[in-house]
Image: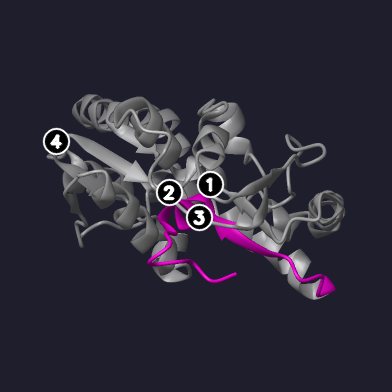
Amino acid sequence: MRVALFATCLVDGLFPEVGRATVRVLRRLGHEVAFPPEQSCCGQMHLNTGYPAEALPLIRRHVRVFEEFDAIVAPSGSCTGSIRHQHADTARRFGDQRLAAAADAVAARTYELSEFLVDVAGATDVGAYFPHRVTYHPTCHSLRLLRVGGKPMALLRAVEGIELAELPAAESCCGFGGTFALKNSAVSSAMLADKVSAVRATGASVCSAGDSSCLMHIGGGLSRLRVGARTLHLAQILASTRSEPVPV
């Protein structure tokens, strides 16, 4: 199986360690992973803010770059959701049926990390070791758009040494929502305050999730309070081993 990493803008630009962790986990399971350097933004930002025409060239590029691979793995429920639910529809909106068909084919082979590990690789125990108290925030796109269900938690439960703490009101949004956090900052801040309070109530030293965007938002709230808790992407916890531990 030819597997490609779709890193996403946020991971590539701000959190490259998440991309590296994703590759480490996939390689540990025996997959050869390619990183096509021509990849760029998937266009979600443009689509969600009302610029579908500007997103169309990005969709064309995404399809061209990834159509040769058997599976495309992204450490992001948000971007995976956009690829599956927006790319082909946008192409059809502009009358490009050929692009729509190709986008549908690529979308069918695109997986959020936990989906790929559990549904395709057939693994919940990926050989991770992480001896810390962790709580997990199920991000909105992974929860409601992709419906990954309990896959992330199944992966975390199999991590050696981990202590999992249930997050109160886990399914509540953290308040990020892309440009929502800028355009509706007061509401976003109030939602973040609720989420940070819930994280603190668990006593966890780490809050994990499958999207770097939400972790950036939650991590900012935690760091400003200086409560001694931090955020780590699910991929980073799964990549941590006794010989190569992820520092906390």
Q: Is residue 70 one of those drawn in magenta? A: no
Q: Is residue 230 one of those drawn in magenta? A: yes
**Residue at left offset 84%, top offset 51%:** 187
Residue stretch rendered in magenta on the structure = 225-248
Total labels drawn: 4
Q: Secondary structure at mark 2?
A: loop
Q: Which mark is residue 75?
A: 2
Reading the image, the residue beneath label 1 is: 210
Reading the image, the residue beneath label 3 is: 237
The C terminus appears in which quarter of the rendering? bottom right
Are discs 3 and 2 less than 8 Å apart at CB?
no
**Residue at left offset 34%, top offset 32%:** 94
Q: Which mark is residue 95?
A: none
Are discs 4 and 2 less than 8 Å apart at CB?
no
User: Which mark is first along the chain, 2 or 4?
Assistant: 4
Q: What kind of residue is marked 1?
A: Gly
Q: Which is nearer the eye, 207 or 78? A: 207
User: Which mark is first along the chain, 2 or 1?
Assistant: 2
Q: Which mark is residue 1?
A: 4
User: Which mark is first along the chain, 3 or 4?
Assistant: 4
Q: Is residue 178 visible?
A: no
Percent x, y of residue 148: 52, 28
Would residue 218 be found to the left or right of residue 139 on screen? right
Percent x, y of residue 157: 56, 38
User: Mark 3 or mark 2: which is in front?
Assistant: 3
User: Which mark is first along the chain, 2 or 3?
Assistant: 2
Percent x, y of residue 36: 19, 56
